């Protein structure tokens, strides 16, 4: 099976932790790797945004193809929309010259839009995954203003796709409620995680490596530094802790996060906790297991997460999670077992649960063990086979016989 994976606005090979480089990048790259390992041929298509090769081999059976669309330089995600017609035209030309693809799998609404048009022109099945939805973002946090164009396109993409992958049941319900998506076309498959990379490492070694003291409580936040992540709630929560020696590491953020970071630093100063907060900037994915293992608790105070990879990565490293009770987090964090889910987006209940865990090492250890055990269901090989099943269903909808490699169907 030859798959055209479309990720127009962000390259899966770009450094993580930037404004537009987070969970979706990890997902597209890791899913593609896993499908290629199963015997599929995968080309990931992204916009050319620098002096970079047009076609870059990534692994056997997996290539990254950069398509001309607008300037060959980084541009704001919102500005990419204007170049999508060119992206579609050039991807179409590339696809016509290449051995035929069997299916298009697109990610996020911009690529979903491109995928919808390409699927029609190339007469291919189209599988879409939205990752976030405009309507849901607007409802999650006061002040979010996703354009109506996005929401209108999302509705059309959902209607025309042969299959929609949702990362959680919650996302599936939202697609049905706000977008009228057909439940028969939706398939809930959680995101995957590399359980060999994300595993518990010795805490004292992790702290020593990161230059962190051995004997004080460490809280950890990881992600793209953006407003929807609720960092201001977390700072208030840290200021309200009984454990006044607890430190918070904020991992992630690039130059474009500078204005929000400056606001957060000002907030920390006003709260009198600036000396307890460390902004590390973005950290390589491969180094993150040391951070998760060094921390006592990982906190995810987001206003919304469609899945929330960070929470799962932390649990895979045996670190309990205190998270907002929103979106995908409600199906990954088990309240009172692997961490706590906080129903209100305000600091006090976060401080309270953090204090409970900080005061009780045995509880933390129990939660940590349960956390690691709970993430086995997110193993990539399992997730990729379930996605291959979705491809099969999408092909059948179009009356096509799917040509899945035997490894993708071996253990059914
Ligand atoms: N990440 C990273 N380095 C950083 C910050 C984040 O590798 O400095 C990764 C993190 O490990 C996770 C992803 O970015 O895999 C964030 O995914 P999540 O689903 O939590 O949030 P999203 O980006 O989808 O909003």
Image (cartoon, rainbow, N blue to C red):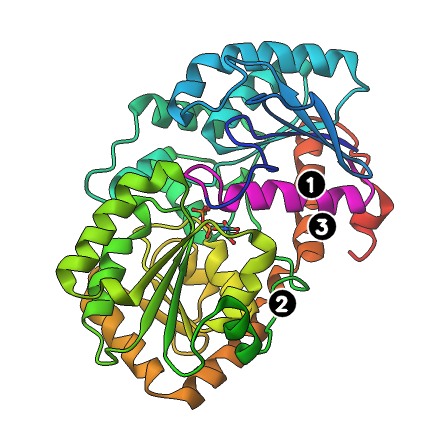
User: Callout 3: helix, strand or loop?
Assistant: helix
Residue most toward the right? 406
Q: Disc 2 designates what residue?
A: 376
Q: Which quarter of the rendering shows the N terminus?
A: top right
Residue 276: image location, x then y, percent: 28, 67
Q: Earlier in the sequence, mark 1 or mark 3?
A: 1
Q: Is mark 3 within 8 Å of ligand 1?
A: no
**Residue 166 among those drawn in magenta:** no
Q: Disc 3 designates what residue?
A: 385
Q: Nearer the viewer, mark 3 or mark 2?
A: 2
Query: Relative to 12, does residue 190 appear above or below in the rendering?
Result: below
Q: Disc 1 designates what residue?
A: 32
Marks 1 and 2 sit apart, C-alpha to C-alpha, by 20 Å
Q: Earlier in the sequence, mark 3 or mark 2?
A: 2
Residue at 42%, 40% (x, y): give it: 132
Q: Which residues are magenta?
A: 18-42
Residues marked 3 and 2 touching at CB (< 8 Å): no
Q: Is residue 149 left or right of residue 57?
A: left
């Amino acid at each position: 099976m030859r798959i055209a994976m479309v990720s127009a606005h962000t390259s899966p090979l770009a450094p993580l932790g930037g404004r537009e480089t987070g969970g979706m990048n990890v997902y597209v790259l890791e899913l593609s790797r896993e499908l290629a390992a199963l015997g599929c041929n995968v080309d990931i298509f992204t916009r050319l945004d620098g002096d970079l090769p047009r076609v870059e081999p990534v692994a056997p059976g997996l290539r990254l193809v950069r398509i001309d669309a607008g300037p060959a330089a980084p541009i704001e995600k919102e500005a990419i929309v204007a170049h999508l017609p060119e992206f579609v035209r050039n991807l179409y030309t590339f696809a016509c010259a290449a051995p035929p693809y069997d299916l298009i799998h697109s990610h996020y609404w911009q690529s979903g839009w491109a995928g919808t048009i390409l699927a029609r022109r190339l007469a291919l099945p189209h599988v879409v995954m939205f990752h976030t939805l405009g309507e849901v973002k607007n409802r999650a946090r006061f002040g979010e203003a996703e354009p109506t164009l996005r929401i209108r396109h999302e509705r059309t993409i959902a209607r025309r796709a042969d299959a929609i992958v949702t990362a959680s049941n919650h996302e599936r319900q939202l697609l049905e409620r706000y977008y009228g998506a057909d439940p028969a076309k939706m398939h809930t498959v959680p995101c995957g995680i590399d359980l060999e990379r994300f595993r518990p490492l010795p805490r004292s070694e992790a702290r020593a490596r990161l230059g962190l003291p051995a004997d004080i409580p460490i809280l950890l936040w990881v992600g793209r530094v953006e407003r929807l992540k609720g960092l201001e709630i977390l700072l208030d929560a840290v200021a309200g802790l009984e454990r006044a020696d607890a430190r918070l590491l904020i991992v992630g953020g690039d130059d474009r996060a500078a204005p929000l970071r400056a606001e957060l630093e000002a907030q920390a100063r006003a709260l009198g906790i600036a000396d307890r907060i460390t902004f590390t900037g973005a950290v390589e994915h491969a180094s993150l297991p040391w951070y998760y293992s060094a921390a006592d608790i990982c906190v995810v105070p987001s206003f919304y997460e469609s899945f929330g990879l960070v929470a799962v990565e932390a649990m895979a490293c045996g670190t309990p999670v205190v998270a907002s009770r929103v979106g995908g987090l409600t199906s990954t964090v088990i309240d009172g077992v692997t961490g706590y889910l906080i129903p209100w987006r305000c600091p006090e209940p976060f401080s309270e649960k953090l204090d409970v865990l900080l005061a009780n090492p045995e509880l933390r250890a129990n939660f940590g063990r349960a956390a690691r055990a709970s993430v086995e269901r997110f193993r990539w090989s399992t997730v990729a086979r379930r996605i291959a099943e979705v491809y099969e269903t999408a092909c059948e909808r179009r009356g096509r016989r799917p040509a899945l490699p035997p490894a993708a169907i071996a253990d059914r």
